[in-house]
Image: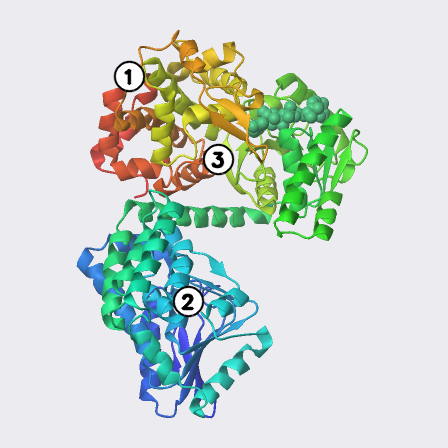
Amino acid sequence: MIYQGKAFRVLPVEDGIAELQFNLEGESVNKFSHSAIEDLDAALEAIRADETVKGLILTSGKDVFIVGADINEFTQTFKQDDETLLAGVMAVNKVFSGFEDLDIPTVAAVNGIALGGGFEICLCADYRVLSTAAKVGLPEVKLGIYPGWGGTVRLPRLIGADNAVEWIASGKEYRPDAALKAGAVDAVVAPEKLKDSAVALVRRCLDGELDYQARKQEKKGKLKLPPIESMMVFETSSAVVKQQAGPHMLAPIAAVKTIQKHAFMDRDKALEVEAKGFLKLAKSSVCNALVGLFLNDQFLKKKAKESASIAAETNKAAVLGAGIMGGGIAYQSALKGTPILMKDINQEGLDLGLSEATKLLSKRVSRGRMDADKMGSVLNKIVPTLSYGDFEGVDVVVEAVVENPKVKKAVLADVENQVSENAVLTSNTSTISINELARDLKRPEQFCGMHFFNPVHAMPLVEVIRGEKTSDATVATVVEYARKMGKTPVVVNDCPGFMVNRVLFPYFGGFSALVRDGADFQQVDKVMERFGWPMGPAYLMDVVGIDTGIHAEGVMSEGYPDRMKRDFKTAIDVMFENQRFGQKNGAGFYQYEQDKKGKPKKVVDEAVYDLLSEVCAERKSFDDEEIIARMMIPLCMETVRTLEDGIVDSVAEADMALIMGIGFPLFRGGALKYIDSLGVAEFVELADKYAHISPLYAPTDKLREMAREGKTFYG
Ligand SMILES: NC(=O)c1ccc[n+]([C@@H]2O[C@H](COP(=O)([O-])OP(=O)(O)OC[C@H]3O[C@@H](n4cnc5c(N)ncnc54)[C@H](O)[C@@H]3O)[C@@H](O)[C@H]2O)c1
């Protein structure tokens, strides 16, 4: 053994060739924490000191190669002052360049995923061999930063500026064949041949067959691109990247600019330029929000894992009602491998549910994401039925019949008699109390809400609603089934609207008051879309369905009369009265025409303004800031309330539910993160300014206390 640390060890392989192996103690994956970097530095020092080492392979002792930097350390690290942060980044660069500058041939033998910093260290090696099971990429932009340990410097020098821009700005992971084609790696081999191939490459260098010194120089010099051509590459890619990234994601375009800036510098100067640009991104609120979301996601996964031990396996499911939701639920369950009975009361319902699933699967096949055999086997997992015949072996039932408490109660009572004593029943209701639905059940402890969002295949969230009597094991079983379906479950307690709709309707309340006071709904839509929402509130209401919205609003108004009771006729009421139900019947706030692909396309209908004149003040223009404040405060304040009322257990779960359930702007990290980014005291002050509009804006006592004490949600 040449070196043994807590992350790295160096051991001789044969004939002066040594192995630098990363195998992080106490962790299931390799990641670059501060201490791992220090250990790498020490390992390299030992290699430099050992004259018997003539060549080196870099390997991993785990299934993954290196997942990247340790994101758990980002929040604290990025809080450091500029000077300290810059020094820290440059210190890592020194270690990485030290690896590149070893006077011996080096080959990275990449067995599994090598992402971010994990791929940047590979770029420091003279050659890279990939196992067919590996994947490589620089996904940093997904966290609002760009590669900061030499990725923007070495990759363009290796694969050309245009390819490197594509890799870095997209943040995509690449399969071995694509990486080989781009020139990012030198060979792809079967997993069992990986180490031997890497050793053989080192040997060819030592035999003088391969010029590894030239390889090192290539990455240390300037970009090989004539200035005119280079200008064209950067100008064209800037335009494309800007368009793809949108106005809020600054990292991809910053990466292009950085590559351009250091294109004609040598490595060490270029690394400095990269680090300075990195600093700005690391300090941005977008990075803070995106890193926060990553950590929230980890937290959710950990929580689900902890409860998995008391969950029962779902090997067979059933859905009642083959409508929009039932069909979607059946598709998703079958797609992810759980067979599902789909029961309806009429054949047309079943036909519709099956044809929806077939359509979605055909799309996958036509896009090359699935073959015809697999499509057949997925479809076979959906068993349509008009009777309860086969319900005995079902583990979980999802009720998705019409939104009517009487019908739902009757259906749930029926199905409870058809399934085994251990089966778990759930309801996909959007508005009916889970406690109420549980009231007449024989086994209320085996019942909870399982609230999917429309369209089921596309929306990642499932709200798992715990009723008063729901057992922990039932919740755990449903959480696991949702995860098996590829969804992210968030567990909440029962209340009107549960978590997501309870928070969404105050946002619509903000919208109704704005329009009443003379705001143009189109302006509100545009401002909120620029703010980052996938669609503005009027458009969203059209997509949800005006009738559905009116119904849900009624439930909220009854549930929270102190702040959600409506005391004026709203623009949404006017749409409803005029039977403009939204996209579903071709007209709502907007008119809908079919585009060439048969998808609804929204167009402006001036007639709507005449209809609205009945309930709206004279139209006037509002500042963007006022629109944003009047829309966002009610939503954020209600999120605070769900947390205070114990509807949701944690800050992380509240924000994740909004991001995944209603498309809250990703780069803002959720409602509570958004309040933190404004400052709790500033948010309270802003809310007070608008409190005259509606009690929806009034800060809670606890929030005022937080403001006074200078506390934040994320600590
Ligand atoms: N559509 C949405 O956006 C959405 C989103 C989340 C939750 N939900 C909830 O999902 C549920 C279903 O909504 P949907 O939009 O799919 O409705 P839908 O009208 O499209 O489908 C309901 C289906 O249930 C069937 N049905 C009625 N009574 C039945 C019975 N006794 N047994 C079996 N099947 C029966 C009907 O034939 C119909 O096919 C509702 O509770 C709704 O609130 C809907």
**Nearest to N terminus: mark 3 or mark 1:** 1
Check disc 3 and report the residue beneath it: 661
Check disc 1 and report the residue beneath it: 620
Disc 1 residue crowd, few under 14, some 14–19, many 20+, Cα 10 Å:
few
Secondary structure, mark 3, is helix
Camera-near label (1 vs 2) is: 1
The answer to the question of whether label 3 and label 1 lie on touching residues, with beta carbons closer than 8 A, is no
Residue in the picture at 41% in, 46% down: 296
Q: Amino acid at mark 1?
A: Lys
Could you tell me if residue 497 is visible in this image? no
- Image coordinates of residue 671 in percent, x first then y, are 36, 35
**Nearest to N terminus: mark 2 or mark 3:** 2
Disc 3 residue crowd, few under 14, some 14–19, many 20+, Cα 10 Å:
many
- Image coordinates of residue 658 in percent, x first then y, are 43, 35
Check disc 2 and report the residue beneath it: 119
- Which quarter of the figure has residue 605? top left
Q: Quadrant of ligand 1?
A: top right
Quarter placement of the C terminus: top left
Residue in the picture at 59% in, 32% down: 598
- Image coordinates of residue 600 in percent, x first then y, are 54, 29
64 vs 168, nearest the viewer? 168
Q: Amino acid at mark 3?
A: Gly
In the image, is residue 133 above or below residue 421? below
Q: Is the residue marked 1 within 8 Å of ligand 1, measured from its CB?
A: no
Q: Is the residue marked 2 within 8 Å of ligand 1, measured from its CB?
A: no
Secondary structure, mark 1, is loop
Q: Is residue 701 left or right of residue 542?
A: left
